[in-house]
Amino acid sequence: MPNKSSQIKATLDGLDNQVVDLVSNFVKRRRKHYEEAAARLHQSLKNDAQRYAEMLADKKINQEDFEMLIKGRWAQLKIELLSELSISKTKFEDIAGDVLKLTVNTLLTVV
Amino acid sequence: MKPNAMLLSIGLLLFSVTTTMQSCMAGFDQIGLDNVTNIGGQLTQLMGKATEPYGKHTDSVNKLLSDISAAATHAAGQKRNAEIGKQWQVLSSELVTPFFNRWKEKGILDKDYVKEAVGQVGKSIDAIKKAEMAKKK
């Protein structure tokens, strides 16, 4: 049995690098995703704020309308960022699931 | 440890890890998805009518505010759902309620302002729906 135990231990130890690679690749992919998402949201915010300012200048809306729209746009941004945060947690659970699957499958081949 | 005992121990360990992981995950929430889909459509439609007198739509506004409050309570009560709960709270207190209060105060609102405000709420609803749909079934 000591042989079996040491074989299981060695197999699990052998997973270390694979787990690190899995997590590392996930983080890289998500980092790129967040940089793009942040740039997209910021550009959209700038476009909207500029449009509201032009509408105010053209007297299509009044000062109070403008202030309400800016506050509303800020709220919209918060909701969009919360969405990204919620989805990132789901994705993180995916990677945790992959790590567990790798460990289970590897163990089953040994035992 | 005997081979069978070791297998049993590993099995129990894996079972407990898997169970713990599942309990930590935000599960798919059909009620949450239905709420955002149904309320979203009605909300943008009603806000679009803010160029008409508020008095014509008082009942619809009150009904919708009540539905939003119920949806926010439902979202806040789900496990691992803090972000979506917060989204409903921001939608209600920072977008929808100020809009309806202003409509009530002014009687009617200008069409250019209404169009932009409807767009903000529509995109916020889309963001909540995206978060709901990302949950695993």
Image (cartoon, coloured by chain):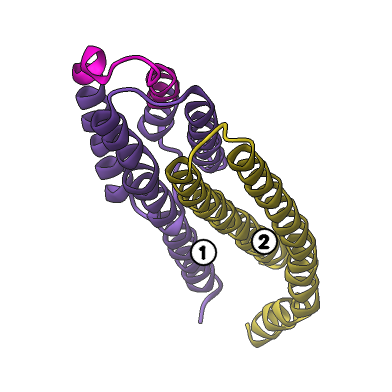
- Chain label for disc 1: B
How far is disc 1 from disc 2 in space, using C-alphas? Answer: 11 Å
Q: Position of residue B40 (x, y in %)?
A: 43, 26
| Quadrant including the N terminus of chain A | bottom right
Q: Quadrant of residue A94?
A: bottom right
Highlighted magenta segment, given as a residue range: B38-59
Chain drawn in yellow: A
Tell me if mark 2 has few (under 14), some (14-19) or many (20+) residues whose alpha carbon lies within 10 angstroms of its own.
few
Say if residue B71 shows up in the picture.
no
- Secondary structure under the numbered disc 1 in the rendered image: helix
Q: Is residue B46 above or below residue B134?
A: above
Badge nearest the viewer, 1 or 2: 1
Chain drawn in purple: B
Labelled disc at residue B28: none
Labelled disc at residue A108: 2
Residue at 55% x, 52% y: name it.
A77
Residue at the spot of label 1: B14
- Chain label for disc 2: A
Q: Is residue A106 magenta?
A: no
Say if residue A49 shows up in the picture.
yes
